[in-house]
Amino acid sequence: MIPPAPPHTTAPAPPPGGRRSRVWLWVLLGIVGALVIVVIVLLATMLGGKAVVPDLTGLSLTKGVAALDEAGLELGEVAYTSDIPAGIEEGQVVTQRPTAGEEVDQGTSVDVVVAGKAEVTVPDVVGMTAEEAADALGAAGLEAKSIEVEHDAEAVPWWIRPPKPGRRSPRDPRSP
């Protein structure tokens, strides 16, 4: 037989931190799980994601590059054409490859054809003869033209003008 419990005793107290500490544990695990899912989705989007090629036709090259950057794509080769179709102005994109609307990997290069002449770097022709300068300009795809310029020797400041023969000239104080 079981002895009866004393009349003034109370039920034993639950262990410290019992049910309440378990709730916080589940909340913390839920937050960590949600963060892991968000990170996985972001990584999957950024790595190996796809991009839709924007329509660059009619855009300037600068605006086209901005549209490609926004889509996560790169500018490929740029070619120029003097055959400008109706509705397109010089300096605007005429065609592109891959075409607008295609789904490609992010980072893919898009080649474009721009209406007008190509931009070139003008060679330094200072100190060359007229013939040498014309050859250097021609090699860069430019056309050389000679222009004769008249100048008034009296309009040039005295420190730049050479002295007239037989006249004395002040020496430049900066020269040795």
Image (cartoon, helix red, strand yellow):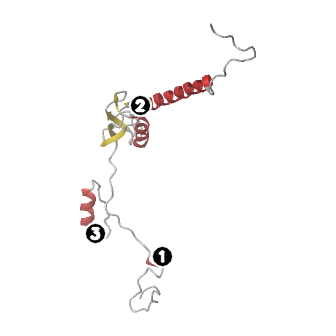
Disc number lying in front (3 or 1): 3
Which image quadrant: the N terminus? top right
Residue named by callout 2: 45
Residue named by callout 1: 155
Residue 51, quarter of picture: top left
Q: Nearer the viewer, residue 137 or 11?
A: 11
Residue named by callout 3: 128
Q: Give me the C-alpha separation between circle 1 and circle 2.
A: 68 Å
Element carrying mark 2 = helix
Q: Of the residues shown, which amino acid type is indicated by label 3? A: Met
Q: Nearer the viewer, residue 39 or 91?
A: 39
Residue 110, quarter of picture: top left
Q: Give me the C-alpha separation between circle 3 and circle 1.
A: 26 Å
Mark 3 or mark 2, earlier in chain: 2
Residue 58's disc is none
Q: Is residue 46 above or below residue 30?
A: below
* Res. 54 in view: no
Is disc 1 surrounded by few (<14), some (14 to 19) or many (20+) residues within 10 Å? few
* Res. 161 in view: yes
Mark 3 or mark 1, earlier in chain: 3
Residue drawn at point x = 44 percent, y = 29 percent: 41
Which image quadrant: the C terminus? bottom left
Residue drawn at point x = 48 percent, y = 78 percent: 157
Residue 91 spot, x, y in % from top left:
39, 42
Q: Of the residues shown, which amino acid type is indicated by label 2? A: Thr
Q: Of the residues shown, which amino acid type is indicated by label 1? A: Ala
Q: Nearer the viewer, residue 174 or 101?
A: 101
